[in-house]
Image (cartoon, rainbow, N blue to C red):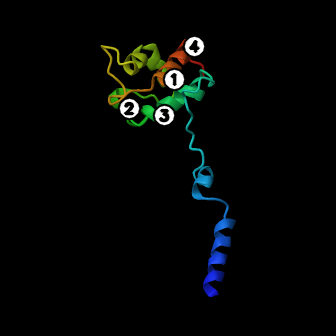
């Protein structure tokens, strides 16, 4: 009888929880700022797309303190300067004559297109 009661209590506790781990994943791991930059609905602005792409793909090497290759992409002014020199698109499109970035792998084509769309829109903040 004790075992049946124990199993019954265990079943009640198990069923009364708020759900399994995966049901509460977002609650336990809050949004970390990731934005799917391939979403065509995003505005062609630095804040909405370009900054996110650069943060996830470039800033670990090209930030204000490390400036690998003497290049910082930490601010919109830094990025605009690099765009105006022609080096940003040359590098990420891996065009001959430019240092290919990132050195291993490549940006997704949709991310490259988002950056190009931002440039074509006049590089709005």
Q: Is residue 73 left or right of residue 94?
A: right
Distance, label 2 to label 1, CA atoms, is 14 Å
Distance, label 2 to label 4, CA atoms, is 25 Å
Horizontal and vertical percent for residue 26? 61, 49
Q: Mark 1, mark 3: which one is toward the viewer? A: 3
- Which residue is denoted by mark 4 in the rendering? 122
Graded by Cα atoms within 10 Å as few (under 14), some (14 to 19) or many (20 or more), the crowding at tag 2 reads some
Graded by Cα atoms within 10 Å as few (under 14), some (14 to 19) or many (20 or more), the crowding at tag 3 reads some
- Which residue is denoted by mark 2 in the rendering? 67
- Which residue is denoted by mark 1 in the rendering? 77
Q: Is residue 46 left or right of residue 98?
A: right
Distance, label 4 to label 3, CA atoms, is 21 Å
Horizontal and vertical percent for residue 110? 50, 23
Q: Mark 1, mark 4: which one is toward the viewer? A: 4
Residue in front for this viewpoint, 105 or 68: 105
Precedes in sequence: disc 2 or disc 1:
2
Tell me the quarter of the picture where residue 43 sits: top right
- Which residue is denoted by mark 3 in the rendering? 55
Q: Residue at x 35, y 19 (%)?
A: 94
Tell me the quarter of the picture where residue 46 sits: top right
Precedes in sequence: disc 1 or disc 3:
3
Give the residue furthest to the left. 97
Distance, label 1 to label 3, CA atoms, is 15 Å
Residue 46 higher or lower than 32, as above or below:
above
Horizontal and vertical percent for residue 20? 60, 59
């Amino acid at each position: 009888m004790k075992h049946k009661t124990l199993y019954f209590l265990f079943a009640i506790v198990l069923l009364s929880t708020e759900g399994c781990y995966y049901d509460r994943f977002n609650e336990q791991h809050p949004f970390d700022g990731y934005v799917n930059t391939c979403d065509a609905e995003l505005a062609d602005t630095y804040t909405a797309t370009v900054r996110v792409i650069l943060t996830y793909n470039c800033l670990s090497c090209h930030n204000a303190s490390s400036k690998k290759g003497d290049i910082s992409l930490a601010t919109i002014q830094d990025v605009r300067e690099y765009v105006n020199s022609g080096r940003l698109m040359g590098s990420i499109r891996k065009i001959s004559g430019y240092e290919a970035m990132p050195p291993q792998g490549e940006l997704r084509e949709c991310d490259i297109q988002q950056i190009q769309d931002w440039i074509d829109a006049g590089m709005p903040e």
